[in-house]
Each structure stands twice: as C-alpha cells, then as structure tokens.
C-alpha cells in the first residue's frame, strides 16, 4: 500500500491528497532515519560496550530515541493506512480521522520536549568522548560510511527529532489551508495544530534556555577561578556586553560591562582575555542615570552614573 501511494507523482491528486501524501512520505523517511540511528549507531555502541554509555545522560537520551522510534513507527503506520484508504487521489476524502490520529499521539510529543531538554548536553558529551576516545572516533567515522547513512554523521541524525515537530505544524497548516471553513474535519485538525504548536514552542524554549546557559558558562570560564560570581541561573539572559570607560576621581580606565536581565557586572580585562570581577549589582537594587555634564561642551561624551546602596560609579 505505502509503496503504491509513494509511487504517485508529487503533483498528482487534489490539494488534500497532496498534503496528506507529503505528511506520509516525510514520516516514512523520518522513521527510516530513526531506525538507521538505532541500528547503525546505538545498538553497536551497546554491543561493543563503549565507555560513552557509562554516561547516564547519554544512555537515558538514547532510550528516549528508542521510545520516539516506537511511537513514530505506530503513528506512521496509522497515517499511511489512512492514505491507502483514500481511493481516487483527485477527489477530496474525509481527513477527520487524521486529526483524531494526531490528537491520539499528541500527548507523546512530551518525549520530544524531554529529548530537546538534554540535546545540547548530550551532543557536547558525545563530542568530548569522541575527542578523548580513539576507538569511538574510529567507530563513528566508520558508521557514517555505512550505505544506510548516506554519508551523514551521528550528529546529523540526532538533530532530526528536534526538526520534526515544527514540520508537523507546517504540514497541518498546509492541510487546513485547503479545507473550507465549515468542513467537519477542521475542529480535530485545528486541535492537533494547537498541540503541535505548543510542543514546538516548548522545544524552542528548551533549546534557547540551553543556549543561554551555555553562553553564561562560557563567560563564567573567562572570570578568575577565585571569583565568587555565579552567572548561570535559570531564566537569566545576557542583554549586552560592552567596553566602557570607568571614571574615577583622578583618572579613567577601560572596563568590560555586562548587562544581564537581573544583574549588572563590571570587570577588568587582562591581556590574556581573563576577566577580574570588580563589581556586581542586582538590578533591583541599583539605578542608572545620566551624570551631569562636567564641562560646558555639549558634544562631550555623556557619562552614566550607576548607583546602589553599597556603591556607585560612573562610566
């Protein structure tokens, strides 16, 4: 059935049919890629007992891949079965069951959110193990040359589940676009679209938060090891980093100023790039105001006065 439908040319059939066919074709390809990830990479890693699988985070992540593969295989089977029952591709069919299928599987999109939550840590861990473990590096290079991989690396397979949920959103939007407003299938498909949209946003948020934390950790490593400054906090964002001149009583010197969503930090920068924290201020306890002009020259650079209960300075 699946092969017969897939052999139809992409342009053939009504808009409904083409949208559902694209959904099926891309799902078949996606499940096939997950199967390759499992067979070519994960199972041999287990059989050969590579040290990387001593890392609990990595093993949980791969078991998550196995769960996603099981769920999506079943989902793929059901939507392709629906396509097989279509009949004449040039005539619109009832797509309401597709909405029901999507809504049945929607709660399982949480698996994708868990996957996204540990994606950055796991891919970083794999890179670190690969750099330190010669046999693992050789294994991954050889696995990428397996004909089933088409020259793609482990990392390129691991990103696929992250990309899949936004794709569901696009496919559902495409299907809804071709349904009349009063069509009985709109309700279930619209509900499926809302659920896919929520999961997609959550995945995006997970990935964005991880990026922010990674940015903080990278910056934290530039500070002296004896610094008590802790930058990586949930929800904190780096808004701006700038080299400014700090004005003292007798002289001025350049300082690095970092503005976070809840914190202001200024630091001296050594020639090596190391940072020495000279002050940190909670934004709840400090304020910034334009400082009065010290000269009569209106073109003179403006200075800002940073004040807190403990300390104040000008930049």
Image: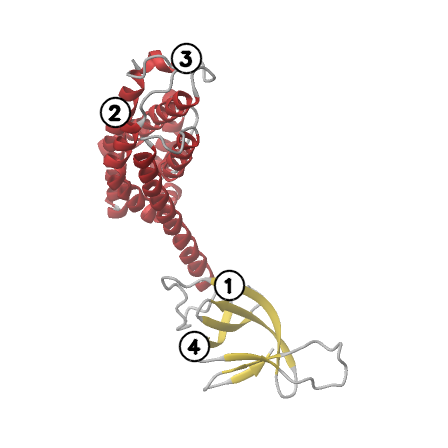
The local secondary structure at tag 1 comes to strand
Q: Earlier in the sequence, mark 1 or mark 2?
A: 2
Question: In the rendered view of the protein, which quadrant contains the C terminus?
Answer: bottom right
Residue pointed to by mark 1: 239
Q: Earlier in the sequence, mark 4 or mark 1?
A: 1
Q: Relative to 183, is 104 on the left or the right?
A: left
Residue pointed to by mark 4: 284
Q: How far, Cα to Cα, is label 4 from label 2?
A: 54 Å
Q: Which of the 4 image quarters holds residue 90?
A: top left
The local secondary structure at tag 2 comes to helix
Residue pointed to by mark 3: 8
Q: Percent position (x, y) of residue 139? A: 35, 31
Q: How far, Cα to Cα, is label 1 from label 2?
A: 46 Å
Q: Look at 65% across and 85% down and name the residue there.
A: 292
User: 71 or 102: which is nearer to us?
Assistant: 102
Q: Percent position (x, y) of residue 205? A: 39, 51
């Amino acid at each position: 059935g699946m092969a017969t439908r897939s052999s139809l040319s992409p342009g053939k059939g009504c808009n409904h049919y083409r949208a559902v066919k694209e959904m099926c074709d891309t799902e078949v390809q996606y499940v096939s890629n997950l199967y390759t990830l499992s067979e070519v990479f994960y199972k041999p890693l287990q059989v050969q007992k590579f040290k990387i699988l001593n890392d609990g985070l990595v093993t949980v992540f791969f078991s998550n891949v196995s769960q996603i593969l099981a769920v999506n295989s079943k989902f793929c089977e059901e939507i392709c079965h629906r396509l097989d029952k279509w009949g004449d591709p040039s005539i619109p069919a009832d797509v309401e069951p597709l909405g029901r299928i999507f809504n049945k599987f929607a709660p399982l999109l949480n698996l994708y959110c868990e996957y996204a939550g540990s994606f950055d840590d796991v891919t970083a861990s794999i890179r670190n193990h690969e750099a330190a473990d010669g046999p693992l590096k050789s294994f991954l290079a050889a696995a990428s040359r397996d004909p089933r991989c088409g020259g793609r690396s482990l990392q390129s397979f691991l990103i696929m589940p992250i990309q899949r949920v936004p794709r569901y959103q696009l496919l559902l939007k495409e299907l809804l676009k071709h349904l009349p407003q009063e069509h009985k299938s709109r309700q279930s498909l619209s509900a499926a679209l809302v659920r896919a949209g929520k999961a997609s946003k959550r995945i995006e948020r997970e990935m964005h938060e991880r990026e922010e934390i990674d940015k903080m950790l990278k910056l934290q490593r530039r500070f002296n090891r004896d610094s008590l400054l802790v930058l990586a906090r949930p929800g904190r964002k780096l808004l701006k980093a700038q080299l400014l001149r700090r004005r003292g009583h007798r002289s001025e010197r350049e300082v690095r100023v970092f503005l976070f969503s809840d914190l202001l930090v200024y630091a001296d920068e050594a020639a090596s790039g190391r940072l020495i924290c000279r002050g940190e201020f909670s934004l709840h306890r400090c304020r910034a105001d334009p400082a009065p002009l010290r000269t009569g020259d209106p073109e003179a650079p403006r200075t800002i006065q940073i004040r807190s209960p403990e300390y104040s300075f000008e930049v």
